[in-house]
Image: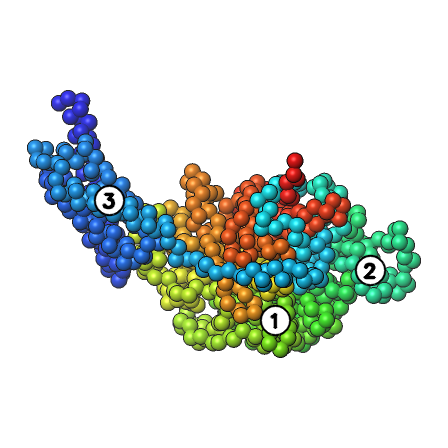
Amino acid sequence: MTDNNKAQLLRITLTICVAIVLGALLALGGAYLAWLGGSWYYLLAGLGLLLVGVLIHRRQRAALWLYALVLLASLVWTVYEVRFDWWQMAPRIDLWCVLGLWLLLPWINRHIAPGQPWRDGASVVLGIGLLLGAGMAGYSLTQDYHRLPGRFDEPRMAAAAAVPTRRSASEWTAYGGSSRGERYASAEQITTANVGRLKKAWEFHTGDLPGEGDPGEITNQVTPLKIGDNLFICTPHSIAIAVDADTGEERWRFDPAINRQAEYYQHMTCRGLAYHDAAAYAGPLIAARDGVAPELSPQAPPRCTQRLFLPTNDATLYALDVHDGKPCEDFGEGGLVDLKVGLGDDALGVYLPTSPPVVTEKLVIVGGSVTDNGSVDSPGGVIRAYDVRSGELVWNFDPGRPGATEPLPAGETYVRSTPNSWTIATADEALGLVYIPMGNQTPDQWGVQRSPEAERFTASLVALELETGRVRWEFRTVHHDLWDRDLPSQPTLVDIEGPNGPLPAIIQATKRGDLYVLDRRSGEPIVPVSEQPVPQGTVEGDFTAPTQPASALSYAPEQPLHERDMWGGTPFDQLICRIQFHRLRYEGDFTPPSEQGSLIYPGNVGVFNWPSLAVDSQRQILFGAPNYLAFVSRLVKRKEGDEQAGTGGGSERGLQPNLGAPYMVSLEPFLSPLGLPCQAPPWGYVTAVDLRSMDKVWQRKNGTSRDSAPLGIPLTVGVPNLGGPLITASGLGFLSGTLDYYLRAYDMRTGEELWKDRLPAGGQATPISYVSEKTGKQYVVVMAGGHGSFGTRLGDSLVAWTLEEDE
């Protein structure tokens, strides 16, 4: 036998083996899927491929006829299931087209049946099938079933731009830009016409990187404050830093040297600082603690007239002077308040104030997260208001004793294991209210032990009186929450334009995707809310609510997941995802957790999370970035999993201990064996709502696979986002939080992406924009430090862009 004949025999043998092995795997998996009640396609295609391998082994040209039939049937089945959706189509036909091309190659085709004509009808039909597949793929690239192609009209955009704003373009004095939480910048130098000229101006490194003993969820989610000539940030280890807003040079830093000896930290993050300027209010606030007002000098204002509030991971609250970063001695004990007081001896590492407090004329109001799924006996989720100057406790809202808001006496403890508020609150000083987005009582997926008070405040937006801390109203977004659907987003205050004039509203985004638009005076819905029936039945001893609220303005998935929505890189991991889908309990949204394992969609990350929304109140436009990822929640009887349970809790993945409960819970993203989401893309969008009509105007896929796909292939698939949006007065939107490392700019008229630039690490933060008081230049700044549990690269970069100067 010649070398050429040996090579030819090897190629034919390899072809036979591939066809038989792939066909056997497909047929076996397909038979199991069919037995589970799923599609018969995989079984039939697998049997066809097996027979193709046998026919090639027998050197019969019928192998090509049969393979052409399998390919053509696959193309018809694909169009039937997913129309011409490229991302759904590709994994269904890619492997079959590659194998079909291989069979057409002369050194394979002519030797399938030696001695017989090889340029026959079978080859022609197979070639037609491949051309048809290529044509379908090409046509699918022109289709986008996931885009809403609307636009805001030009007169509206132009007229609103001329209206004076309430804020200076040089300021960013609160987490959400202002006390209203709008994430809106009055700056308008950077426009849709010149945004392509943005260039990096400077990059500052904090030097605070992950260290030994840090949790997996170490993150850089900070939104800088811009006050005077400086930017103010905090780092994952609670270090406060002042940076020159024009050059990125460090001005000062304060390291509280947090206690790292806690047994376990759920998170290691700091989302931001809060700012108070006594001079912005009437005189009494700059009085010293003894009531004697200090002498004011225009050249040298008293120390700490302007102060920053820094929450730390070891549960303290510092007041720092804006100018030098040193503690304000008149606040608490030497500049700090211990937030662990009244929470029990186990508060360190379990109670975590990761978000900036709310600051009003007289108060600094603080909440904090409590480790998710750690123990049924945990510190309570009390909300406390301290005197903004002295640090003395003014009132406390204890969800376990909501009527007792007077300061807790020394030596007593707040009610244990109550709902907490881990995200950012918003205050309306004109109405005398602070709005608290509440979370869950731990554990999240087991609700038997919850009290009536816990049920009342879990996943509720609660309006408290600033003067007393008493409840004015509450609005519940989930009944008996078993899905970790706590309220994650800062609520936004906006005056909605209506036929009878402006209506004072508050908008609360949720993990389910509902946008609740309420009258912020009373909590009554402005956009209708209805009760919808939901799936019933959970583990013995617990219960499910018969209905759940749903807003008429919602980004919740319009349809439940179906088997045809399962995805993968190839037909094989897609088949496995289909099998997983049928093995899980899934009856649509609010499918209860189960021992079988329940598919939760939207999953734990939520459609909206802490990044919240951006609102242009002048144009009445809302800008957001919804996500769509499914999770699997499985309840595990304690006796079966004690040895597997970790010591902490709160991770987005793995077995959660739920100490003291009869069930632990396993939480995992719904992934294929290749690590890809089992549900088909897109998984992330940018979108806009017209607040006058409450209609969605446009929606586009957002982000590429560059930093999550093999070889860094930048396919515009629409990836998840975990970073906040920004709107500017010039009609631009900015966003940085996608899985690929970019800061992007969008035209708010249509959502079109106008510009992007690479980030040195994940951009899971909210960008800000301001105009320099020194140079008049407009900057866009964002923290690029990554997110441990989101899976993006960690770093320590604060990056600024400005327009490139004309040469």
For marks 1 and 3, the one nearer the N-term is 3
User: Is residue 128 left or right of 735 when viewed as pictured?
Assistant: left
Give the image location of residue 153, x and y in percent: 54, 62
Q: CA distance from mark 1 to mark 2?
A: 32 Å
User: Could you classify mark 2 by the number of other residues whose Cα lies within 10 Å: few (under 14), some (14-19), or many (20 or more)?
Assistant: few
User: Which one is in front in this view, the residue at disc 1 or the one at disc 3?
Assistant: 1
Give the image location of residue 254, x and y in percent: 74, 46
Q: Tell me, what colour scheme is on the image?
A: rainbow
Give the image location of residue 397, x and y in percent: 67, 70
- Amino acid marked by disc 2: Ala
- Mark number displayed over residue 311: none
* Helix, strand or loop for disc 2: helix
What residue sits 43% from the left and 45% below the top? 715
Furthest-front residue in view? 155
User: Could you classify mark 3 by the number of other residues whose Cα lies within 10 Å: few (under 14), some (14-19), or many (20 or more)?
Assistant: many
User: Is residue 386 left or right of 488 when viewed as pictured?
Assistant: right
Q: Is residue 555 visible?
A: yes
What residue sits 48% from the left and 76% below the top? 530
Q: Which residue, given by chain and number where applicable, does mark 1 sit on?
A: 497
- Amino acid marked by disc 3: Leu
Q: Which residue, given by chain and number where applicable, does mark 3 sit on?
A: 130
For marks 3 and 2, the one nearer the N-term is 3
User: Could you classify mark 1 by the number of other residues whose Cα lies within 10 Å: few (under 14), some (14-19), or many (20 or more)?
Assistant: some
For marks 1 and 2, the one nearer the N-term is 2
Q: Is residue 415 visible?
A: no
User: Which one is in front in this view, the residue at disc 3 or the one at disc 2?
Assistant: 3
* Helix, strand or loop for disc 1: strand
Residue 610, located in which quarter of the rendered image? bottom right
- Mark number displayed over residue 279: 2
Q: CA distance from mark 3 to mark 2?
A: 74 Å
Residue 81, located in which quarter of the rendered image? bottom left
